[in-house]
């Protein structure tokens, strides 16, 4: 009995294997978009299965066998006749079926979606255009000037005079059938490649063209696509062109660094992408130092090094923005180096120094607070990061007090920072305590000043 069951099981598996071997895997092609009036080639393929079991092939839509452009039904008996010209009828989505019938009468079906568009409704947008330039010329995004969100961030390349640039633009795959031609222009004229031919082409097979800039400066190139209705869509690519042989006023390394005096504004220009402008300054004694660098409409930071080229963090980002502020550094006597190489273009640099205030003029607690009076002005230093200077004021009548602070340290009443426009209510004879301290993310020594005014 067990042997019979085993034979039945083996027979079932054999039948299943044979049934599976008769299955066909089909390929009807990829989904495509065409224009009204375009003829497409219907080319169905059998990827796997026993072709000797195929009765014939056909193409259907809505249950009806399709006809080719000659008016014959698309029915064929071998792969050699698989390609058939078909004209879709009407705009919109068409679900076509590639059908294989086997000798037993069973159907195997693979669907193909064809989207037919009216030429009256075609549209290519700027977002459909893409710069497809080789990796050695990375396309970058221009940053908006700080605080100006009305200006768009354009695409650009950093290049040198004489570079051979493989200009290449493409259109989104879903819109390629709408394109009549492509071209590149500069100042309204079609650009020419090295051979002197205009960069004008009709298919993306020939889209890569070599263009050589000859003069340093900026060139705004237009990648222009003309659709089949003659409408043009364009996208701008900015070339930032640098002459490698232009005069570089400041050295690229420590050994060729430009010596500068502290507390003096120095002008410079980063001439090209790989340019590094090195400066050196010397401190005769231990001092507080801040590196102030100003690129036009750019984040303000540089790189500070010790004499053996170890980096010293010199700038701190301002939360919620792309801005940076100098760190107040306490540096020992010696020579230091600044590398100004963040952005191409003009900049100013100043190494600001401040003497160390060795005497703490004002007490750090309420018990050691210094009394101030109406009209008083205090000029002093926060001597170190955790220094606090306490003051108190005793009003001779009920009224209000205003405080006008300047400098980095902040004046507090209680736990609240006070500003020039703030009005503080006071009562006769009741002490008003003020404290001056560094706000968070500030370190070291800083000068400050504030004045107090009483109003009755």
Image: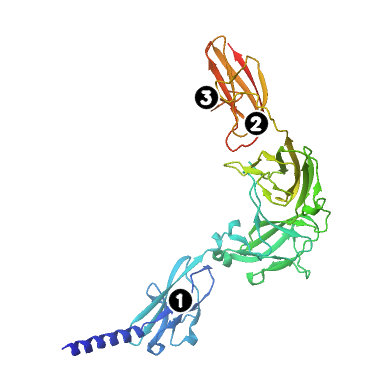
Mark number, residue 28 = 1
Any part of residue 236 in sight? yes
- Residue located farthest toward the left when viewing the structure as drawn: 1
Asked if disc 2 and disc 1 are in contact, CB closer than 8 Å, the reply is no
Q: Secondary structure at mark 2?
A: loop
Residue depicted at 36% across the width and 82% down the height: 23
Q: Indicate the quadrant containing the N terminus: top left, top right, bottom left or bottom right.
A: bottom left
Of badges 2 and 3, nearer the viewer stands: 2
Residue at the top extreme of this rendering: 397
| Residue 414's disc number | 3
* Residue 163 in the figure: left or right of residue 155: right
Numbered label tally: 3
Residue 29 image position (x, y, % from top left)? 48, 75
Compare residues 416 and 161 and report the one nearer the observer: 416
Q: How is the image coloured?
A: rainbow
Q: Secondary structure at mark 3?
A: loop
For discs 2 and 1, the disc positioned in front in the rendered view: 2
Task: Tell me if I can see residue 125 in this picture.
Answer: no
Q: Secondary structure at mark 1?
A: loop
Q: Give the residue at x 82% y 50%.
A: 249
The disc placed on residue 305 is none
> In this image, 213 relative to 364: left or right?
right
Mark toward the start of the polypeptide (2 vs 1): 1
Q: Disc 2 and disc 1: Cα gap in Å?
A: 80 Å
User: Residue visible at 77% across and 56% down?
Assistant: 242
Task: Name the mark on residue 383.
Answer: 2
Cα distance between the residues tagged 2 and 3? 21 Å
Q: Earlier in the sequence, mark 3 or mark 1?
A: 1
**Left or right: 417 in relation to 95:** right
Toward which corner of the image does residue 108 lie, by quadrant? bottom left
Q: Which percent across, then down, holds residue 8? A: 22, 87
């Amino acid at each position: 009995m067990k042997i019979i069951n085993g034979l039945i099981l083996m027979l079932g598996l054999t039948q299943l294997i044979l049934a599976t071997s008769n299955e066909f895997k089909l390929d009807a092609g990829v989904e495509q978009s065409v224009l009204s009036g375009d003829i497409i080639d219907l080319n169905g393929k059998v990827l796997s299965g026993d072709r000797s079991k195929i009765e014939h092939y056909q193409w259907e839509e809505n249950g009806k066998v399709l006809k080719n452009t000659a008016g014959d039904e698309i029915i064929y008996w071998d792969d050699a006749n698989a390609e058939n010209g078909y004209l879709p009828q009407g705009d919109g989505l068409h679900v076509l079926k590639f059908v294989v019938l086997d000798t037993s009468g069973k159907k195997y079906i693979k669907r193909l979606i064809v989207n037919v568009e009216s030429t009256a409704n075609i549209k290519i947008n700027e977002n459909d255009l893409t710069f497809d330039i080789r990796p050695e010329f990375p396309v970058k995004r221009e940053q908006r000037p700080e605080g100006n969100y009305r200006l768009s961030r354009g695409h650009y390349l950093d290049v040198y005079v004489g570079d051979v640039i493989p200009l290449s633009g493409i259109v989104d795959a879903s819109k390629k059938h709408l394109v009549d031609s492509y071209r590149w222009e500069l100042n309204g004229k079609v650009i020419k490649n090295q051979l002197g031919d205009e960069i004008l082409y009709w298919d993306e097979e020939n889209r890569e063209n070599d263009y050589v800039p000859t003069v340093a400066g900026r060139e705004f190139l237009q990648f222009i696509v003309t659709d089949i209705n003659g409408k043009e869509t364009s996208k701008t690519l900015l070339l930032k062109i640098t002459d490698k042989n232009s005069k570089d006023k400041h050295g690229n390394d420590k050994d060729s660094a430009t010596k500068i005096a502290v507390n003096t504004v120095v002008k410079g220009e980063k001439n090209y992408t790989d340019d590094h402008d090195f400066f050196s300054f010397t401190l005769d004694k231990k001092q507080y130092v801040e590196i102030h660098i100003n690129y036009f409409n750019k984040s303000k930071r540089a790189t500070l090094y010790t004499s053996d080229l170890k980096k010293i963090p010199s700038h701190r980002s301002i939360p919620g923005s792309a801005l940076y502020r100098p760190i107040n550094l306490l540096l020992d006597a010696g020579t230091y180096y600044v590398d100004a190489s963040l952005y191409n273009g003009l900049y100013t640099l100043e190494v600001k120094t401040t003497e160390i205030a060795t005497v703490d003029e004002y007490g750090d607690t309420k018990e050691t607070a210094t009394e101030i009076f109406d009209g008083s002005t205090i000029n002093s230093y926060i001597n170190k990061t955790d220094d606090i200077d306490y003051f108190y004021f005793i009003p001779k009548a009920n009224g209000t007090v205003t405080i006008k602070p300047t400098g980095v340290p902040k004046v507090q009443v209680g736990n609240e920072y006070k500003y020039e426009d703030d009005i503080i209510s006071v009562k006769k004879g009741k002490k008003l305590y003020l404290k001056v301290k560094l706000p968070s993310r500030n370190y070291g020594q800083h000068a400050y000043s504030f004045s107090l005014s009483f109003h009755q």
